[in-house]
Each structure stands twice: as C-alpha cells, then as structure tokens.
C-alpha cells in the first residue's frame, strides 16, 4: 500500500506567520494555485481514495485532487492540526513575549509542551497515527491513497513511522504544499519520499 501525505498550501495566516491550529482558514490565491499543481501530479499516483483533515484549507486541496481523480473526499478528524488553544492566531514573536515559559519549553523540550487550553504533541501524534492505522485497515496491499493534512500533524506521523522521539521534533521541516510518501506492506512501513516540492512551479515553492 502506498501513502501520499500532502501538506496544504498557503493561507493568509501562513503568509503573516500566524499560528493556525484548529482555526478554519481558507487557502489564499497562491495556496489555491499550489493545490491545483499538487492535484495535477496526483494523477500519476494511481489513487483509490482521498482522505483529508476536515479543516477548509486541507479540504480545498482534496477537492482539487478529486477534480483530477473523481472520488469522494473522506474527512478524518484525527488528521487535524495541533490544537493551539490560546495561541491560535498569534505569531512566534507574540508567543515569546506573552508566553515565555511555554515558548522556552516548546523550543527545548517540545514533547513536554502543553499548549494553553490546547493539545500536546503526544496527543497530536497519537490521534494522527491512529488515523493512519485506521486508513490502512480499510485498504488492500495494492491500493494508493492520499492524505491531506498539516505541518505538525504530518511531521508527527513521519516521526512515528521512523521511530524518532518527539524531543527531536524541531529537527524536521515541512514546506507548504509538499508531498511525503511511504509504503506499507507485510515487510513493514518504509519512508520513500519527504518534503518534495518538485511538482510546484518556481513561484509556488
């Protein structure tokens, strides 16, 4: 079985450096262009199913892919981004100023951070990975599926796949509209691609 993990494209909050979390922000013009380019390359993946976080910015990508490979979009709550609680909509600089202790732990020991009235990385990893396991159970070995999700969620999934402790979370980077891929079969799971942006035009990378 083949998994293609797609991060959504740009929103205005991405452009402004504001944390989005569960806030339901739409793609901006550049993000929609990125989604169309991602959909175009997805036609080569032999997809049999489309799974998406239910947030608008990921559903918009899923809908573009569904235009190329017509099929229903299955919305999976487990694929949503980390809930940031009181930090939704703030910038990194504002976080440093208003929540200095949270910021310090987030940078040094991210696995120990609990977002104010939000989630922990452990909670995110557990629910996102469970979503992947649930998808696996629905498909056969020859199937290929696409999963459209978010920065922290996809990094958590890949970290779990590779057995990377959450304390090293910040050693991974993931671009907007990038694609990761892994295989899953009787031999186990193997990462085959990470943070690919080769399908995007120069102005959309």
Image: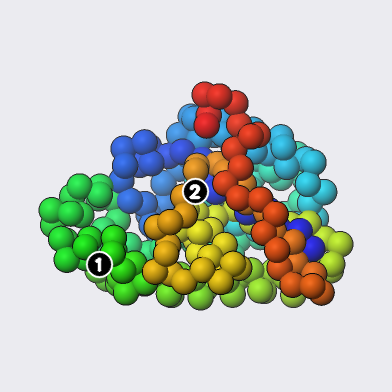
Q: Percent x, y for residue 179?
A: 62, 46
Identity of the residue drawn at 42% across and 39% down: 11
All told, the count of numbered labels is: 2
* Sequence order check, earlier mark of 2 and 1: 1
Which residue bears the numbered disc 2? 174
Viewer-nearest residue: 182 or 56: 182
Mark 1: which secondary structure? helix
* As drawn, 157 above or below 7: below
Left or right of 69, for residue 152 = left
Q: Residue furthest right?
A: 142
Identity of the residue drawn at 25% across and 49% down: 92
Whether residue 33 can be seen here: yes
Q: Percent x, y for residue 146?
A: 69, 54
Mark 2: which secondary structure? loop
Viewer-nearest residue: 63 or 164: 164
Q: Toward which corner of the image does residue 118 lie, by quadrant?
A: bottom left
Label 2: few (<14), some or many (≥20) within 10 Å? some
**Mark carried by residue 92:** none
**Mark carried by residue 105:** 1
* As drawn, 160 above or below 67: below
Q: Considering the image in quadrants, where does the N terminus appear?
A: bottom right
Q: Percent x, y for residue 49?
A: 75, 57
Viewer-nearest residue: 57 or 177: 177
Label 1: few (<14), some or many (≥20) within 10 Å? some
Identity of the residue drawn at 30% across and 46% down: 18
């Amino acid at each position: 079985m083949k998994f293609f993990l797609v991060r959504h494209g740009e929103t205005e909050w991405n452009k402004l450096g504001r944390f989005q979390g569960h806030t339901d922000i739409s793609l901006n013009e550049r993000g929609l262009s990125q989604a169309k380019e991602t959909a175009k390359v997805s036609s080569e993946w032999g997809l049999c199913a489309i799974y998406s976080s239910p947030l608008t910015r990921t559903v918009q990508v899923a809908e573009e892919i569904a235009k190329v490979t017509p099929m229903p979009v299955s919305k999976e709550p487990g694929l949503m981004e980390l809930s940031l609680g009181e930090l939704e909509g703030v910038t990194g600089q504002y976080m440093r100023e208003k929540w200095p202790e949270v910021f310090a732990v987030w940078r040094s020991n991210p696995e120990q951070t609990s977002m104010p009235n939000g989630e922990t990385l452990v909670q995110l990893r557990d629910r996102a990975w469970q979503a992947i396991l649930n998808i696996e159970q629905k498909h056969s070995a020859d199937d290929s599926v696409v999963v459209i999700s978010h920065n922290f969620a996809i990094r958590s999934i890949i970290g779990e796949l590779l057995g990377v402790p959450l304390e090293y979370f910040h050693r991974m980077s993931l671009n907007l509209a990038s694609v990761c891929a892994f295989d899953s079969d009787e031999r186990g799971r193997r990462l085959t691609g990470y943070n690919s942006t080769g399908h995007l035009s120069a102005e959309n990378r």
